[in-house]
């Protein structure tokens, strides 16, 4: 039998809901033959998943997230980066926001980021009447979303798309 790999999985949330399910399933699969530690923000946890992970031998590290607007993401990034730097993970698998991805990269541990794609024109789903102000705000939000998405695929050395479509989107 080959030696176990020490893997850290970084996610924004520890919950089986919607898009957050992928890192949970990856952790379960990898834990069968490897040492897995799962990192997530403490405010975003599911009790059943916590219990299940403990039964499977997956170590859970919850980061107390800062409630400060804007600066909170930077504080969370620094906290997680310090935690990851102290660990001896051979690789990190990230499924998260830009600030927590940066924490993984700053830890100097080899990192593979999973890209889940982007959604532009987010206000179109909320407002049927798209006046000039909604249009301008949508364009501004699209720019922010584009920049964040660009950084999510350009900062790490390795990126995996969750599907062929998102893989193609990431290459653009």
Image (cartoon, rainbow, N blue to C red):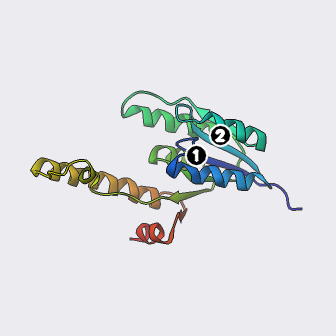
Disc 1 and disc 2: Cα gap in Å? 7 Å
Does label 1 or label 2 sit earlier along the sequence?
A: 1
Give the residue at mark 2: 49
Q: Position of residue 94 (x, y in %)?
A: 57, 52
15 w.r.t. 143: above or below: above
Q: In which quadrant will I find the C terminus?
A: bottom left
Image quadrant where one finds the N terminus = bottom right
Please, what secondary structure does the residue beneath circle 2 have? helix
The structure residue drawn at horizontal position 61% and vertical position 54%, both measured from the top left corner, is 93
167 shown above or below 125:
below
Looking at the image, residue 172 lies above or below residue 73:
below
Within 10 Å of disc 1 (Cα), the crowding (few <14, some 14-19, many 20+) is some
Q: Is residue 107 visible?
A: no
Residue 91 is left or right of residue 65, and the answer is: right
Residue 83 locus on image (x, y percent):
63, 37
Closest to the observer, 43 or 158:
43
Q: Judge whether residue 129 can be spotted in this image.
A: yes
Tell me: residue 171, above or below residue 154. below
Q: Quadrant of residue 121?
A: bottom left
Label placed on residue 66: none
Foreground residue among 143 and 33: 33
Name, please, the residue furthest toward the front. Answer: 128
* Within-10-Å neighbours for mark 2: few <14, some 14–19, many 20+: some
Q: Which residue occupies the foreground of this view, 97 or 134?
A: 134
Q: Position of residue 24 (x, y in %)?
A: 63, 49
- Name the residue carrying label 1: 16
Q: Quadrant of residue 41?
A: top right
Residue 89, image x, y percentages: 70, 48
Residue 67 in the figure: left or right of residue 105: left
Which residue is rendered at x = 14% and y = 51% of the image?
129
Does the CB distance between marks 1 and 2 fall below 8 Å? yes
């Amino acid at each position: 039998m080959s030696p176990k790999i020490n893997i850290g999985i970084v996610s924004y949330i520890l919950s089986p809901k919607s898009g957050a399910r992928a890192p949970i399933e990856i952790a379960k699969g990898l834990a069968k033959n490897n040492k897995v530690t799962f990192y997530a923000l403490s405010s975003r946890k599911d009790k059943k998943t916590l219990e299940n992970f403990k039964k499977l031998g997956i170590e859970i590290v919850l980061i107390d997230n800062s409630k400060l607007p804007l600066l909170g993401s930077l504080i969370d990034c620094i906290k997680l980066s310090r935690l990851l730097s102290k660990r001896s993970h051979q690789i990190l698998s990230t499924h998260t926001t830009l600030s927590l991805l940066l924490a993984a990269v700053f830890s100097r541990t080899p990192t593979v980021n999973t890209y889940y794609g982007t959604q532009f024109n987010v206000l179109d789903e909320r407002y049927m009447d798209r006046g000039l102000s909604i249009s301008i705000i949508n364009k501004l939000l699209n720019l922010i979303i584009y920049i964040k998405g660009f950084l999510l695929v350009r900062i790490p050395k390795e990126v995996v798309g969750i599907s062929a479509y998102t893989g193609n989107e990431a290459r653009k």
